[in-house]
Image: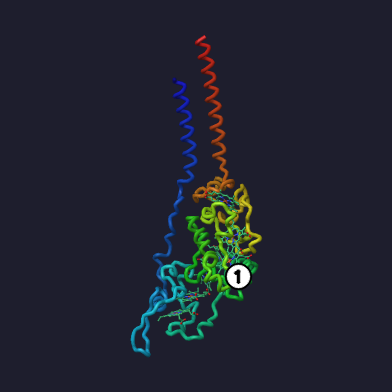
């Protein structure tokens, strides 16, 4: 009787230790706190920009038709809408619209020749600038030149096609919530790869069905929520934070164990920005803290130790049990 209570207590305590140990990892900030940046940002050009936002800031705009001599209301086409809140949270929030666009745009109707306006490229402003050295613009530029999209440059593909000039903001670098970052980055690709109207502006190719093209991947929705397109479609480059060399489809990652293994490629890409601090207990905790568990890629020394302890505990219980039984059987004899 005494023995079985002892045994139950012992096993119970082992179970509670092990579950506490494994849940501790999940407790820290799995549901990320949203980045509370820039809500309070006040642009030095707020008033200037308002001249443009009054028409480009929403679906509807108004102007005075000089011929009719009255106010006219019209719809702004969705492609020409610039969302104010997004603009003032973007990397270029401190800009005036007319830093990048001709100041002639203050006139309406806009002069026709403005359609031919030349636009700056990233590298025109960021190239060779010490202040932005940490981003490695030059290397990103040369990777882009080797990427599969570069052949579409003459049809209008530029860095701006992935980095929306009015809303792009650095995300993975400051990520507090990996799932949101993954969604943000994947939306960049899906902007064309799930919207044929944008896709066909750049190519004569027939529409590709992304879901169907990836049906070899089990649990597609789980994968697309947990890895970025660029994990499989770019070549890992350790010199730059976000690899930009998108390879032809034949070179995409298809082998499961490129991710589902101890030296998963994700360590050099998606999880690159996990701080050393978070990683001090090995890869395991850095990833667990972000709420994902990649089968095969995670290994924790503590859990290994714990399983040894449990094993030893079980042996001890069995030995004690045997001793008691032997004693008991001796007594009854
Ligand atoms: C009275 C309303 C109105 C105002 C104010 C206005 N726009 Fe426009 N804008 C339009 C409309 C309508 C179009 C689409 C028709 C066209 O291209 O003229 C347009 C088109 C554009 C285009 C796209 C041209 C193209 O190549 O297709 C740009 C860029 C632009 N506006 C920038 C600006 C900037 C910058 C400002 C502020 C300095 C501004 N607009 C102010 C109504 C306005
Ligand atoms: C950092 C530079 C930059 C700033 C600042 C900027 N734009 Fe633009 N804008 C661009 C570029 C580049 C394009 C062309 C995008 C493309 O080719 O996909 C563009 C395109 C446009 C278009 C045409 C939409 C289209 O897709 O062709 C409109 C309208 C426009 N901008 C309005 C504005 C307004 C209004 C502001 C200020 C609130 C503004 N822009 C601020 C760089 C900028
Ligand atoms: C007209 C010049 C100009 C162009 C074109 C331009 N940038 Fe910038 N960019 C700047 C300036 C200036 C800043 C700093 C803004 C500030 O500090 O408020 C900046 C800020 C940034 C930042 C944030 C840097 C930080 O540390 O906060 C990133 C990232 C960035 N740009 C990326 C790009 C990319 C990608 C492109 C092209 C798609 C691009 N920029 C095009 C001038 C430009
Ligand atoms: C096919 C899409 C695509 C194209 C084209 C592209 N980028 Fe990017 N870029 C991305 C994605 C996705 C990210 C990750 C965004 C994030 O989470 O911060 C990124 C991130 C960046 C960053 C931030 C990296 C960091 O350290 O935080 C810079 C700078 C940048 N791109 C510059 C460029 C320049 C310059 C070009 C053109 C030569 C370019 N990009 C073209 C998709 C693209
Ligand atoms: C787990 C790895 C993986 C992920 C994640 C992934 N892909 Fe793929 N993708 C592949 C492979 C492998 C192929 C080649 C399939 C084939 O040839 O049958 C491919 C093919 C493609 C193709 C070419 C289709 C064609 O027929 O020409 C496109 C476009 C594409 N992927 C875009 C994306 C986009 C956009 C995302 C993100 C939403 C994404 N991929 C996520 C591995 C991946
Ligand atoms: C502005 C639109 C646009 C964006 C954004 C875009 N793509 Fe593409 N992509 C295209 C077009 C158009 C093609 C077809 C090129 C052709 O004609 O062969 C293509 C082709 C591809 C291919 C197939 C290459 C091959 O070998 O046939 C892959 C893979 C791909 N894109 C991945 C991506 C990924 C990953 C992203 C996001 C980081 C992305 N794309 C963002 C327009 C886009
Ligand atoms: C680009 C890296 C990558 C590749 C390649 C990859 N996976 Fe995954 N896989 C992941 C990640 C990340 C998760 C999500 C872990 C999580 O749930 O947080 C995952 C989850 C899974 C899951 C669990 C799904 C669920 O319901 O929780 C299975 C099963 C799986 N992968 C099987 C495969 C197989 C089979 C292949 C090869 C055909 C493959 N994976 C290729 C990264 C990858």
Say whether residue 9 is left or right of residue 196. Answer: left
Q: How far from the left and from the top, in percent, is residue 124? A: 57, 74
Residue for badge 1: 205
Q: Is mark 1 within 8 Å of ligand 6?
A: yes
| Residue 47 visible (yes or no) | no
Q: How far from the left and from the top, in percent, is residue 79? A: 47, 74
In this rendering, the answer to whether 3 lies above or below 83 is above
| Residue 144 visible (yes or no) | yes
Looking at the rendering, which quadrant does residue 144 occupy?
Answer: bottom right
Looking at the rendering, which quadrant does residue 247 occupy?
Answer: bottom right
Say whether residue 16 is left or right of residue 143. Answer: left
Which residue appears at 46% of the width and 27% of the height?
A: 8
Residue situated in front as seen by the camera: 267 or 259: 259
**Direction top: furthest residue:** 333
Which residue appears at 63% of the width and 56% of the height?
A: 253
Which residue appears at 56% of the width and 36% of the height?
A: 305
């Amino acid at each position: 009787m005494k023995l079985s209570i002892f045994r139950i207590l012992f096993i119970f305590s082992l179970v509670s230790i092990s579950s506490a140990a494994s849940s501790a990892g999940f407790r820290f900030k799995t549901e990320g706190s949203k980045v509370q940046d820039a809500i309070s940002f006040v642009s030095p050009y707020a008033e200037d920009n308002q001249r443009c936002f009054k028409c480009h800031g929403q679906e509807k705009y108004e102007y005075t038709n000089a011929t009719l001599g009255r106010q006219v209301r019209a719809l702004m086409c969705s492609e020409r809408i610039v969302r104010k809140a997004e603009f003032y949270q973007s990397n270029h929030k401190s800009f005036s619209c007319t830093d990048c666009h001709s100041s002639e745009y203050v006139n309406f109707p806009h002069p026709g020749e403005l359609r031919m306006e030349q636009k700056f490229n990233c590298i025109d402003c960021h190239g060779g600038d010490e202040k932005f050295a940490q981003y490695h613009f030059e290397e990103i530029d040369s990777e882009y030149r080797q990427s599969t999209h570069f052949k579409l440059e003459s049809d209008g593909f530029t860095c701006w096609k992935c980095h929306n000039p009015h809303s792009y903001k650095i995300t993975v670098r400051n990520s507090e919530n990996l799932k949101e970052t993954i969604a943000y980055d994947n939306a960049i690709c899906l902007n064309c790869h799930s919207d044929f109207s944008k896709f066909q502006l750049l190519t004569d190719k027939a529409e590709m069905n992304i879901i169907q093209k990836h049906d070899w991947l089990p649990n597609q929705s789980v994968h697309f929520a947990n890895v970025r397109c660029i994990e499989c479609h770019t070549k890992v480059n350790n010199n730059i934070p976000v690899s930009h060399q998108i390879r032809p489809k034949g070179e995409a990652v298809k082998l499961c164990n490129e991710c589902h293994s101890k030296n998963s490629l994700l360590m050099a890409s998606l999880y690159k920005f996990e701080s050393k601090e978070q990683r001090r207990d090995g890869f395991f905790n850095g990833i667990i803290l972000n709420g994902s568990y990649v089968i095969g890629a995670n290994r924790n020394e503590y859990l290994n130790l714990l399983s040894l302890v449990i094993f030893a505990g079980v042996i001890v219980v069995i030995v004690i049990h045997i001793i008691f039984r032997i004693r008991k059987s001796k007594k009854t004899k």
